[in-house]
Image (cartoon, helix red, strand yellow):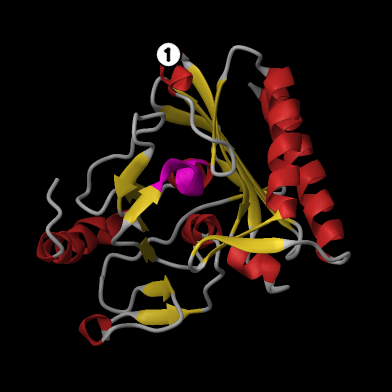
């Protein structure tokens, strides 16, 4: 596994360097759907990553935000779960809150995860049972047990969450989860249907750092599912996870979503 991790880290760094270089050159961008931007750089990285990662593990399936899904992946024991640029909105605006995200799922669970964020000069990685790392520094999540005062990466907090503390938020959900892994935030939570490629790598990094990671109802995340989606993601210091689930679950039910 160590050799595979090193190879994936090198591939992520290659993709990140390409994206950073292309960011300074200018590129075409458009909206896949209103408010959902994509750029030609996303597609270039998708092609690069598929070629490099498929060469590493020819038997592994492929699930990526920028590739049309193919149900053949469901028959694969191992599947690459990739977002070439997580946080495209920041990327196309010239901001730094984006990352290359690469996860490897095996029998439904992520066993390897790498995030490369060249615009801020940080790289994270984790392997199942081997801990989570940013560069050469091992990560440990926060030990908070009091939900009130928990730090949340967000632009603003709703009135019902006024007991929490907002901290600066990158557009990339993967980078926000990595903040929990590194103890720079206590809680990241979403209440919407999200895709596996957004969180695969970061979920393992946070878990290996000791954080609790689940969907909005506290159910452990599974990967390489037929829909490749889960309702909400919740990553937090373990001591506040149950309180976070309690708060989120009620809101999810008000939206008409149940476990």
* Viewer can see residue 7: yes
Residue at the location (42% across, 13% down)?
75
Residue sitting nearer the eye, 84 or 167: 84
Is residue 154 placed above or below 83 in the rendered structure?
below
Please tell me which residue lies in front, 167 or 15: 15
Residue 18 x, y percent position in the rendering: 83, 50
Judged left or right of residue 177, residue 235 is left
Is residue 198 one of those drawn in magenta? yes
Q: Position of residue 197 (x, y in %)?
A: 50, 43
| Mark 1 secondary-structure assignment | helix
Rendered image quadrant of residue 125: top right
Quadrant occupied by the N terminus: top right
Residue neighbourhood size for the residue with mark 1, other residues' Cα within 10 Å, grouped as few (<14), some (14–19), many (≥20) = few
Residue 193 lies, with reference to residue 226, above or below; the image says: below
Instruction: Give the extent of the magenta segment.
Output: 195-200
Quadrant for the C terminus, please: top left
Q: Which residue is mark 1?
A: 75
Q: Is residue 128 visible?
A: no
């Amino acid at each position: 596994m160590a050799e595979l991790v090193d190879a994936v880290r090198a591939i992520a760094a290659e993709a990140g360097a390409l994206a950073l270089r292309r960011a300074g050159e200018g590129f075409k961008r458009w909206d896949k759907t209103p408010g959902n931007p994509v750029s030609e750089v996303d597609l270039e990285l998708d092609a690069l990553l598929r070629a490099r990662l498929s060469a590493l593990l020819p038997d592994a399936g492929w699930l990526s935000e920028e590739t049309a899904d193919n149900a053949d992946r469901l028959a694969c024991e191992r599947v690459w779960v990739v977002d070439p640029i997580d946080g495209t909105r920041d990327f196309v605006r010239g901001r730094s809150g984006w990352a290359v995200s690469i996860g490897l799922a095996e029998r439904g669970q992520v066993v390897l995860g790498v995030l490369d964020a060249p615009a801020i000069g940080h790289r994270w990685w984790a392997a199942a049972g081997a801990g989570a790392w940013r560069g050469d520094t091992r990560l440990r999540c926060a030990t908070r047990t009091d939900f009130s005062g928990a730090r949340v990466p967000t632009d603003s907090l709703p009135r019902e969450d006024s007991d929490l503390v907002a901290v600066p938020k990158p557009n990339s959900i993967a980078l926000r989860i990595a903040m929990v892994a590194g103890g720079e935030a206590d809680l990241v939570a979403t209440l919407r249907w999200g895709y596996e490629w957004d969180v695969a790598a970061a979920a393992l990094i946070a878990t290996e750092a000791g954080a609790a990671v689940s969907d909005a109802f506290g159910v452990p995340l599974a990967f390489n599912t037929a829909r490749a989606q889960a309702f909400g993601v919740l990553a937090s210091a373990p001591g506040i996870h149950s309180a976070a689930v309690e708060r989120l679950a009620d809101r999810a039910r008000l939206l008409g979503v149940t476990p």
